[in-house]
Image: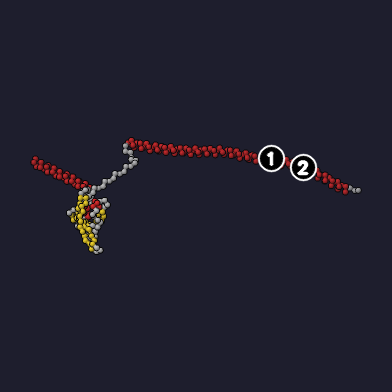
Amino acid sequence: TAALTGSLSSGLSSITTSLSSLSLSSRSAAVSAADNVGVGLGIKKNQHGDFMIMDIVDGGAAALTSKVAVGDILQKVDKTSVAGIKSATLRDLILGAPLSSAILSLCRWVADGDEGGEWKSYQVLITRQKKPRRAAPAATTASAPTTASGITAAAASRAAAATSAAANRAKTVAATAAATSSSATAAAAARPRAAAASTSGAAGGASARGGASAGVATSTSAPSAAAVTHAAPVAATVASVAGSAASRVSPS
């Protein structure tokens, strides 16, 4: 029984170790696959089902060889033929670790005269490049406070700004109120002076009208010296006419 138990424990330990190793290798493979890079070629199937070079990335691994051209047909990746395989499978063949190499077998149509020509095969050794490093984000000029003292200072600064703004508004309101009060006081002081001036003018007019009336009455009650002088000859003439009439009437 003891031997059987020991054997079972040993077997379980071996299985656990194998599973751990498999898990580690799977994670390592996943990390490696994420780091894999291509060769800087855009490849697509044409109407005949062949993988044709459609694009060459500027500065990429293939472009650095100066041998691959757009329109070339891919035949093999290393020793694996690509005839009839799917695009996903071709992608797995081309991707590899940075700085690793791949041999691509291609063929190119070479024209001969106006109508003739032939397909010529060639191979090119391509070294996969490293992935470009991502640039670090630019540091901002003003970073947010992360410590308690920084947060307190920021809050104090905002409170001081709010207090200053409130004081400025209070000064503006006070100045406006003072100006309004001064205008109202001046207007109230001017109203009594205007009323007094109006009353004085009315009294002066009444006095003038009274003086004119008195002058008329005086003229009516007492004739002037010129009137008396003019009346004396008239009276003498009347007396002479009366005397002549009396002499005509009395008998001779």
Q: Nearer the viewer, residue 6 or 114?
A: 114
Task: Find numbered disc 2 in the image and state the secondary structure of the residue it sits on.
Answer: helix
Residue that sits furthest to the top in the current view: 149
Q: Residues within 10 Å of mark 2 (few under 14, many from 20)?
A: few
Which residue is painted at 22% across and 55% down in the image? 87
Q: Position of residue 202 (x, y in %)?
A: 63, 40
Q: Position of residue 16 (x, y in %)?
A: 15, 43
| Image quadrant assignment for residue 6 | top left
Residue that sits furthest to the right in the current view: 252
Colour scheme in the image? secondary structure
Q: Nearer the viewer, residue 181 or 90?
A: 90
Q: Amino acid at mark 1?
A: Gly
Q: Is residue 34 visible?
A: no
Q: Which residue is mark 1?
A: 211
Q: Amino acid at mark 2?
A: Ala
Q: Nearer the viewer, residue 36 or 218?
A: 36
Q: Position of residue 215 (x, y in %)?
A: 71, 41
Q: Do the residues bearing badges 1 and 2 touch, measured as CB atoms within 8 Å?
A: no
Q: Which of disc 2 and disc 1 is earlier in sequence?
A: 1
Q: Is 223 placed above or below 86 here?
A: above
Q: Position of residue 114 (x, y in %)?
A: 25, 63
Task: Find numbered disc 1 in the image and state the secondary structure of the residue it sits on.
Answer: helix
How far is the residue under mark 1 from the one under mark 2?
24 Å
| Number of the label disc, if any, that sits on residue 226 | 2
Q: Quadrant of the N terminus?
A: top left
Q: Is residue 71 visible?
A: yes
